[in-house]
Image (cartoon, rainbow, N blue to C red):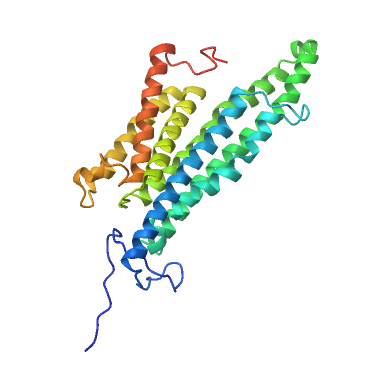
């Protein structure tokens, strides 16, 4: 009797994980783990994702905040300490961000075989993530260059006030680097790149069910959510016109997260939106948006739509 091969499953919400023996985009052979192995692997994966999300949020928060609130000694007028501190940001945050992406079930199964043209769902997600990572790194590079090279011009202007009065373009050069390239173009480029990468995670984990989470995993997940929410609010408060963007962003992305969870319930009551982590990654971003929105509204209530510098907060 001829045995037909198993049909391609449209959903990847299943516990068995295949061992890939073919090329990146070929149909995977299905060699399921034992139920106990699957349960152990899933719990370990959930813990790893929670730890990595916490690590990513913490790294981004520290690497972004420390140069703002602390004075890092300059190596010279050409090499400012706060600018060089940020040099390490993409080297730390990008691998952490990518590790979250690669723990999605889609990355282990390949997802839909022909998701977009010849690309599988996994290939499509990785390429889209790489675009966001490129924007993030380019923004950091522009920020680093502008932040470093504005200082020699600033120092020259302070030492030669008569020349600045005679040639106003010297001050315009400094302000162009600080205001246009560093504070506007660079800030929004790397913020947009970071948001883009988080959207890829929402896409990859949109159907994935987690748990049951251990107590340790739940604690790590909650702390990471709080830190990412603080990061969202901090970026909104720091950037020029960032409060307008932060207000809209947290509402829009939070709403999208609610729709992802509730419209694709995956057999869970209300999609698991009120559970402790059964839709862990989507709930992480939803919780962060709620926290960020609360902080942004509280700031606006006290200082209006002024950012930190305009409000005179050191």
Residue sitting at 74 percent across and 31 percent down?
A: 79
In the drawing, does residue 258 fall left or right of residue 307? left
Quarter of the picture containing the N terminus is bottom left
Expressed as whole percent of the image width and height from the top left, the position of residue 284 reads 37, 40
Expressed as whole percent of the image width and height from the top left, the position of residue 8 reads 29, 68
119 shown above or below 227: below
Expressed as whole percent of the image width and height from the top left, the position of residue 177 reads 65, 26
294 shown above or below 100: above
Q: Does the rendering let one see residue 116?
A: no
Quarter of the picture containing the C terminus is top right
218 shown above or below 162: below
Q: Quadrant of residue 179?
A: top right
In this orientation, which residue lies closer to the viewer: 283 or 256?
283
Q: Quadrant of residue 298?
A: top left
Label tally: 0
Residue sitting at 37 percent across and 38 percent down?
A: 285
Q: Quadrant of residue 257?
A: top left
In the drawing, does residue 125 fall left or right of residue 1? right
In the drawing, does residue 312 fall left or right of residue 113? right
| Residue that lies at the very extreme toward the bottom in this rendered image | 1
Residue sitting at 27 percent across and 42 percent down?
A: 275
Q: Does the rendering let one see residue 138?
A: yes
191 shown above or below 306: below
Expressed as whole percent of the image width and height from the top left, the position of residue 218 reads 37, 42
């Amino acid at each position: 009797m001829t045995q037909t091969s198993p049909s391609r499953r449209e959903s990847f919400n299943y516990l068995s994980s295949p061992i890939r023996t073919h090329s990146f985009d070929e149909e995977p052979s299905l060699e399921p783990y034992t139920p106990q192995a699957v349960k152990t692997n899933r719990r370990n994966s959930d813990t790893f994702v929670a730890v990595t999300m916490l690590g990513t949020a913490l790294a981004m928060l520290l690497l972004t905040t420390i140069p703002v609130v602390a004075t890092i000694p300059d190596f010279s007028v050409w090499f400012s300490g706060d600018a060089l501190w940020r040099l390490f940001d993409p080297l730390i945050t990008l691998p952490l961000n990518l590790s979250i992406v690669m723990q999605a079930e889609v990355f282990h199964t390949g997802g839909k075989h022909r998701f977009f043209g010849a690309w599988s769902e996994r290939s499509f997600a990785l390429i889209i993530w790489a675009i966001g990572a490129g924007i993030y790194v380019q923004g950091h590079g522009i920020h680093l260059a502008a932040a470093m090279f504005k200082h020699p011009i600033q120092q020259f202007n302070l030492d030669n006030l008569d020349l600045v009065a005679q040639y106003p373009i010297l001050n315009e050069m400094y302000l162009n680097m600080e205001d246009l390239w560093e504070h506007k173009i660079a800030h929004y480029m790397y913020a947009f790149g970071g948001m883009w990468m988080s959207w890829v995670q929402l896409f990859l984990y949109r159907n994935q069910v987690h748990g049951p989470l251990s107590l340790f995993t739940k604690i790590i997940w909650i702390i990471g959510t709080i830190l990412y929410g603080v990061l969202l609010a901090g970026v909104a408060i720091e950037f020029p016109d960032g409060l307008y963007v932060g207000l809209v962003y947290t509402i829009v992305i939070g709403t999208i997260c609610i729709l992802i969870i509730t419209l694709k319930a995956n057999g869970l009551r209300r999609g698991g939106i009120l559970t402790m982590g059964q839709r862990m990654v989507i709930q992480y971003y939803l919780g962060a948006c709620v926290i960020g929105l609360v902080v942004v509204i509280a700031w606006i209530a006290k200082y209006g739509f002024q950012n930190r510098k305009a409000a005179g907060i050191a």
